[in-house]
Amino acid sequence: MKVLLKIILFLLPYFFATMLFAQSTGTPVPDDEMNIFLMAFACLFLGAMLGAAVLGAILATLLFLLALFLVSFGVLSTSFLIGLYKRSLAAGFKSLLLLCFGLPCAVFGLAAAFLFNHIMPLHLPGLALALTGLLSGCIGGLLLGLVAFALSKKLWAGFSKRLQLN
C-alpha cells in the first residue's frame, strides 16, 4: 500500500500539469511557413535515405552477382587454391587478377579479330583467325593483370606506410 501511495504522489504533479494545459483557452499561433520548411526538409532527408538504401541494395546485388560469376567460372576457387598451394596471399591475389584480366581480354581479342577481319580482310582461315584473336587477347590480358598486380602492390605499400602497418 505504501508503494502505491508513493507512486500516486509521485505522478500527481504530472497529472495536474497535464490537466492545467488541457484547460488552456488560448489558441495556438499558426506557424505555416516553418511547417512547410520542415516538411520540405523531411521529404528531402527521406528521399536521400531512400536513394542511399536503393543504391546500397543495387551495389550489394552487383557484388553478389560478380562473386557468383567468379565462382561459377572457377576463377575464385582456382585463385584460392593457388594461394593455399603456394601459402601466399599475394600469389592467390595475383592469380585472381591474371584470370580476371586474361579470360575477358581473350574473348575481347577474339571479337576484335573477327571485327578487324570484317573491316579489313586478312585472308586467314576461321580457325587461324580465332586462335590469333584468342592468343593476342590472352597475352594482352595477362600483361594487363601483371600491371594491375604491380600497381596494387605499390598502392598497398603506400597505404600500409601511411597507416604504419609494417
Image: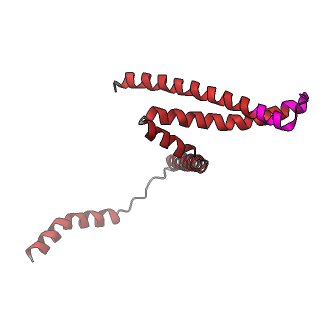
Query: In the visual, does 58 lie left or right of 153?
Result: right
Could you tell me if residue 44 is visible in this image? no
Could you say which is closer to the camera, residue 165 or residue 23?
165
Instruction: Please identify the quarter of the rendering in which residue 163 is found.
Output: top left
Q: Farthest residue to the left: give it.
A: 2
Report the residue at 65% width, 30% height from top.
141
As drawn, is 112 to the left or to the right of 159? right
State the residue at coordinates (89%, 28%).
Answer: 122
Give residue 119's position: percent from left, percent from top.
Answer: 90, 30
Q: Residue at x 50, y 35 (%)?
A: 93
Identify whether 35 is placed above or below 102: below
Magenta residues, as a range? 116-133
Q: Residue furthest bottom?
A: 1
Q: Tell me where residue 101 appears, x and y as whole percent.
A: 63, 34
Residue 28 image offset from top left, x and y in percent: 43, 56
Residue shown at 89%/33% (left/top)? 118
Q: Is residue 24 magenta?
A: no
Prevalent SS, magenta region = helix
User: In this figure, which colouring scheme has been used for the structure?
Assistant: secondary structure
* Residue 120 image point, x, y percent: 90, 27
Which part of the image, by quadrant, shows the N terminus?
A: bottom left
72 w.r.t. 139: above or below: below
Closer to the camera, 40 or 68?
A: 68
In the image: residue 48, left or right of residue 158? right
